[in-house]
Amino acid sequence: MISLTLAEIAEIVGGRLHGTDGAPTVTGTVEFDSRRLTPGGLFVALPGENVDGHSFAAAAVAGGAAGVLAAREVDAPAVIAPPLPPGQAHARSVALTGDTDGSGAAVLAALGRLARHVVVELSRRGLIVVGVTGSSGKTSTKDLIAQLLEPLGPTVAPPGSFNNELGHPWTALRADETTRHLVLEMSARGPGHIAELATVAPPRIGVVLNVGTAHIGEFGSREGIARTKGELVEALPEDGVAVLNVDDPLVAEMAGRTRAQVVGVGERPDAEIRAEDITLDEHARASFQLVTPGGRAPVRLPLYGEHHVGNALAAAAVALELGSGVDEVAARLSAVERRSARRMEVITRADGVTVLNDSYNANPESVRAALKTLASMTRGEKGGRSWAVLGVMGELGADSVSAHDEIGRLAVRLDIGRLVVVGEDAAAMHHGASHEGSWGEESVLVPDTEAAIRLLREQVEPGDVVLVKASKVAALWRVAEALVADQEDDK
């Protein structure tokens, strides 16, 4: 963050000073976890159901913080966030903080105003903000973009999927005078959410990956999701760039919703940045020709799954726009790393069992991609059995049963060896698999993660490949971590 006095912060957020004349200057990080504060930082005191950050305000300042951004007066120098007008407390912000009176939402709103001030000021000095949205692939693409841009200058990106009203401004406030690129992942669970995030950190480059069915229970239809995802390209300036996946018709249509230059990416022959001659190796890692207006170059992605090709094309478009050459981009894509945990995290045990931990989250599109990756990794004479351990896909509304049923049927069509469905909420997957073919015991429904772990420990054999995937609420990473821990226990 840029250096600001508490008085300046109070003016920016529309708050008032408490316990200070406003002279202390924030020179460190902005944190809502007091344990992570650096000297001269700003502590954001968020109220909550179980833990109230206001209780740690005095300790944060005693530990070196310059002051506190708070919802109410504390025993420390503070900026008190203004209360929101009645009815303006964003339901998602209230849910994030766990408060009951909207005071947490008020602090988040103030944090957003502070982030906007910093980003706008830094943008005047040359900061480029890149926003990424889509129903799936946001985190992986954000990580790819960051890795391609880092050689061009200091780059800030959020850890994991920190992409909501708290993570968005928190990440933006990591930028300072030295930062050249700010890469932000933008999520939405309702209309207007992406527009709000774009107000906090105005993007110059916007990337839209796809329109799927994630959170369709909140939006009502894919068209409703598309309207919200398109808020990103509507926020771009006239001198900005919209990177659109033209393989997705609902994304391609967004070209008419922006003043910015449009760059199409995909496999279609009319895509400006496209992939040709895609092949997969025995581990489902993709190789392709990166084709651009400035030339072509071979790429060999070290990531698992063909779905990463589209993510790589989007990242390439951003890097090319910001000055990289084609050969340079291709070489960097061929050397990227997986940065975010529980996303196609592949671990092979000493006994030859391979665990695909893709358990961070799930929607129908990402589960389909994961199943196809699993099928690719177990084809051929040397391939072991394929196991798909799947749990509930959340927030699908009225489409939930049919979506789960379709995934179960797809597992059969892809010839997945064993399907383990975890939890009654996902039971339609098991029923779909059973109705699709005479699988018998090849598909099984278990009540919880403990039962899934027991079954796998009894039946998985050396050479098998086990995919674990579900929405966060299912906490299926416990299954993947237990399988990996078994290897450690055997040492």
Image: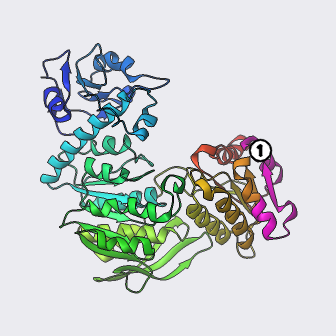
Q: Quadrant of the N terminus?
A: top left
Query: Magenta stretch: dominant SS?
Result: helix
Position of residue 112 measured from the top left corner of the image (x, y, whole percent): 28, 40
Name the spot of residue 120 as percent of width and height, x first: 17, 49
* Foreground of the two, 327 or 364: 364
Within 10 Å of disc 1 (Cα), the crowding (few <14, some 14-19, many 20+) is: some
Q: Quadrant of residue 437?
A: bottom right
Residue at the spot 20% in from the left edge and 63% down from the top edge? 237
Going by the numbered disc 1, the residue's amino acid type is: Pro
What is the residue that sits farthest to the top in this orientation? 75
Q: Indicate left or right for 301 with 43 as reference.
A: right
Task: Name the image colouring.
Answer: rainbow
Q: Position of residue 321 (x, y in %)?
A: 25, 70
The residue identified by callout 1 is 447
What span is in magenta? 431-460
Is 342 contained in the magenta span? no
Residue 336 visible in this rendered orientation of the protein: no
**Residue drawn 21% across and 47% down?**
119
Compared across the picture, whether 405 is left or right of 3 comes to: right
Q: Quadrant of the C terminus?
A: top right
